[in-house]
Image: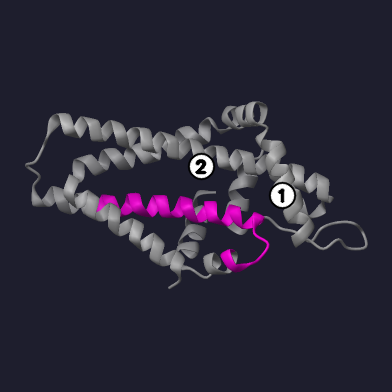
Amino acid sequence: MSWVDLAALTVMLWHSANGYLLGGRQMVLRFCGLVAALLVALYLQKPFSLYLSLEWQAERFFGRLISRSLAELLHVGATGSFDFQLPPLAGAVMQRLAEEPETIAAFSQVAASQAVGEMMIRFLAVIVFFYFLAVAFTLILRVGRQKLKCNNITESQRFSGLIIGSLCGLLLSLLCCVLLDALSIFTASAFLGQDLSGSYLYLVTAHVLAFIL
């Protein structure tokens, strides 16, 4: 068990304890809110990524970062092509979000930087928009809970809240795992990738993505 698994376990335990205190009804609403936030983020990732590129020059920014990373990580062969593959987990998501799935290994450095930068913007648009919606929905639930002040939570409600809370923690851990896998593109060393790929969370995330995608 690596530090990645320990971090994921901590997140799940924290959400389980929170679910036990809040009860099953609140945690059902929170879990549905997380799923809805993810679906909305996936649906709106195209206009949001376009906004980031036009207003904040995000695609150009990530293109430069990726170009530097490619210059350090990749070896140019005699044909001028790169022996490079997208991260396994995040790469599958990026290819699915891309309008036209592309083979990065056959690109030159400039073309590869542009292609990966565009896919990275779409991927980060989903993650950022999801967390924004998730935080907003959590705050709305917290305000509503303070107004209702429901303290008579039965033991069965607490137990169901514990189970659903662990599912919320698992969902967030899976998303964080995919995010870390995407950020491994920018790391010059394989330290992050090795720790991540050797974790149980990585295996669970791979199975979930294989089922969904």
Q: Quadrant of residue 139?
A: top left
Q: Residue at point 22% right, 40% down? A: 26
Residue 132 in view of the camera? yes
Q: Position of residue 64 (x, y in %)?
A: 74, 44
Cα gap from disc 1 to disc 2, whole angstroms: 19 Å
Asked if the residues shown at circle 1 and circle 2 are in contact, with their CB atoms under 8 angstroms apart, the answer is no
Q: Residue at point 57% right, 56% down? A: 181
Q: Which residue is mark 1?
A: 66
Q: Quadrant of residue 29?
A: top left
Magenta segment: does it hold 10? no
Horizontal side of 159 relative to 51 (left or right) equals left
Q: Which residue is mark 2?
A: 127
Judging from the image, what secondary structure is the residue with disc 1 in? helix
Q: Residue at point 9% right, 41% down? A: 151
Q: Nearer the viewer, mark 1 or mark 2?
A: 1
| For residue 152, above or below residue 51 | below
The N terminus lies in quadrant: bottom left
Q: Position of residue 7 (x, y in %)?
A: 40, 62
Specify the segment rendered in magenta.
Answer: 163-192
